[in-house]
Amino acid sequence: MVAESVDITLDEFDLDVEKGRLTRFGEFARRHPTVVWGAAVLIVMTVLTVLSPYITADPLEIDPIRRLKRPSSEYWFGTDNLGRNIFSRTLHGGRISLTVGLGVAIFATVTGLVIGLVSGYSRPIDAVMMRIMDGLMAIPEILLAITLVAITSASIQNVIMAITIPEVPRVARLVRSIVLTIREEPYVEAAVSVGAGIPKMLFRHILPNTIAPLLVQGTYVFAAAVITEALLGFIGAGTPPEIPSWGNIMAEGRIYFQLAPWIIFFPGMFLTLTVLAVNIFGDGLRDMLDPRLARQM
């Protein structure tokens, strides 16, 4: 009897813990619906693109007999002018777009963080680095990306590099503005008065205050990189044609837009949903990490 009562008690405890988790998640979803919905869409997109080699056919398989087939139960998104499956090409193309977006977000955020920290704390370095950042920001982002890709070659690595360079100044200026504000705070001045070194000042007292704005800025960089990659692919300056991406899929389908609009519609729909989800997630993340809004809620 004692053993049975202990088992029942443990089961009830596990059930209470599970209910508590669901309650906390429900409360979080109620307070931050944009974070939940944006993250959900991104997770679905990521799972579909990652599993695309296992759930779809070869995106490069050509079959002239089935060219320009309308969407049906057999070909969910139809086929293109070479008979290639648009559903398979769209999911495989998402792997490229998401990889480029994530790579640019990581490299631009890390590089901009280092430049912003150093420039914001050292006035001599700031005078030089910010003029370089101003020069990069004076050049239109897409033109700079096209130029860098044309100088190198069409590959995923070069596309990531070409899109990262124009995004670095935006991140660097954001971090610099935060550092300029924080270094005047009393606790930073107190740390300087007791002899704290520059590395300790940057990484212990200043860096933690930049994490929340950087996370939000990283989502915007991700969305901008996905759009820029699609634009580069659309004008033929992105990844090679044998590597499907949302941009070059739509570029190949623009000639057949009146006959087969689905070639452009489905990659464009996935691109729109992804960018919209990232922006919604970033807006919700900004509201969630803002201490003033947190106190109000």
Image (cartoon, rainbow, N blue to C red):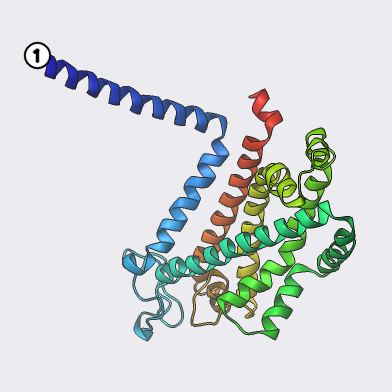
Instruction: Specify the amino acid type for callout 1.
Output: Met
Q: Residue at x 51, y 60 (%)?
A: 270
**Residue 284, position as x, y percentages in the image:** 61, 40
Query: Where, by quadrant of the figure, is residue 160 drawn?
Result: bottom right
Query: Where, by quadrant of the figure, is residue 151 drawn?
Result: bottom right
Total labels drawn: 1
Helix, strand, or loop for circle 1? loop
| In the displayed structure image, the side of residue 206 where residue 288 appears, left or right | left
Q: Residue furthest front?
A: 195
Q: Residue at x 66, y 41 (%)?
A: 286
Q: Residue at x 84, y 64 (%)?
A: 129
Front position in the image: 112 or 248: 112
Q: Quadrant of the N terminus?
A: top left
**Residue 195, position as x, y percentages in the image:** 79, 43
Q: Residue furthest left?
A: 1
Above or below: residue 220 compared with residue 196: below
Front position in the image: 21 or 140: 21
Front position in the image: 166 or 127: 127
Above or below: residue 110 compared with residue 165: above
Q: Quadrant of the C terminus?
A: top right
**Residue 103, position as x, y percentages in the image:** 58, 64
Front position in the image: 274 or 9: 9
**Residue 76, position as x, y percentages in the image:** 37, 64
| In the displayed structure image, the side of residue 287 where residue 135 appears, left or right | right
Q: Residues within 10 Å of mark 1 (few under 14, many from 20)?
A: few
The residue under label 1 is: 1
| In the displayed structure image, the side of residue 274 where residue 130 appears, left or right | right
